[in-house]
Amino acid sequence: MNKTAKKILVFTGLGLDVALTLFLFVVAIIMIATMPKDSLAMDHAIETNGKFIGYLQQHSTLYLLTCVLPLFVLLAGNIAILILYVRKINKKKEAAIDDLNEEQKAALRAELLKELQSEAKESEEDKKSE
C-alpha cells in the first residue's frame, strides 16, 4: 500500500470516528435534556421528543446497546491506538556508524577503549589470583 492511499485511509477513519463520536454524544445530550419526569410523560415521549429520541427513551436497553456501549468501545479503541502510536514514535532506532558525526565517533571509540582496558585488567587480575 502506498503512502497516499494509507493517508487517505487514516484520515477517512479519523473522520468517521469523530463523526460517529459527535453523533452519539449529541444523542446522549438530547436524551438527558428531554427525559420525561414521570411514567405518564414517558408514554407520550414519542409525540413530545420525536420518533427517534422518544423511542430510545422508551427502550433504555436499546439506547444502552446503540449509543452508550459504542461510545465506550470507541473510547477504548482510541486509547489503544494512541498508546500504539506513542510507542511507535518513541521506539529507539539502532544507530549506524554512518549516522554518527565525528565527535560521537570519537566518544564511542574512547568508551570502547576504556571498556577493553577494564576487561583486560580484570582478566589479568583473574590470572594473578589463580
Image (spheres, rainbow, N blue to C red):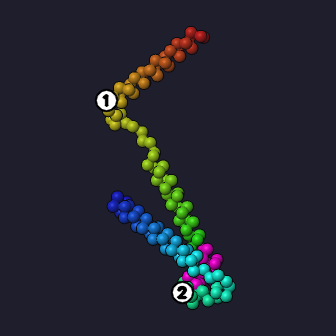
Circle 1: element type: helix
Residue sitting farthest toward the top: 128
In whole angstroms, how far apart are the C-alphas of marks 1 and 2?
Answer: 73 Å
Residue type at mark 2 is Gly
Question: Which of the 4 image quadrants contains residue 72?
Answer: bottom right
Question: Which of the 4 image quadrants contains residue 56?
Answer: bottom right
Image point 60% across, 74% down: which residue? 65
Q: Is residue 24 visible?
A: no
Image point 57% across, 80% down: which residue? 34
Residue sitting farthest toward the front: 37
Coordinates of residue 25 in the picture (x, y in percent): 52, 71
- Relative to residue 10, is residue 64 depicted above or below? below
- For disc 2, the marked residue is 50
Labels 1, 2: front one: 2
Q: Is residue 111 visible?
A: yes
Circle 2: element type: loop
- Relative to residue 70, is residue 115 depicted above or below? above
Compare marks 1 and 2 and give the one earlier in the sequence. 2
Q: Is label 1 in contact with label 2 (beta carbons under 8 Å)? A: no
Magenta range is: 53-66
- Relative to residue 118, is residue 39 depicted above or below? below
- For disc 1, the marked residue is 102
Residue sitting farthest toward the right: 39
Residue type at mark 1 is Glu
Image point 50% across, 19% down: which residue? 119
Q: Residues within 10 Å of mark 1 (few under 14, many from 20)?
A: few
Coordinates of residue 26 in the picture (x, y in percent): 51, 74
- Relative to residue 89, is residue 110 depicted above or below? above
Coordinates of residue 3 in the picture (x, y in percent): 34, 58
Q: Is residue 65 left or right of residue 100?
A: right
Q: Main secondary structure of the magenta part?
A: helix
Closer-to-camera residue (48/25):
48
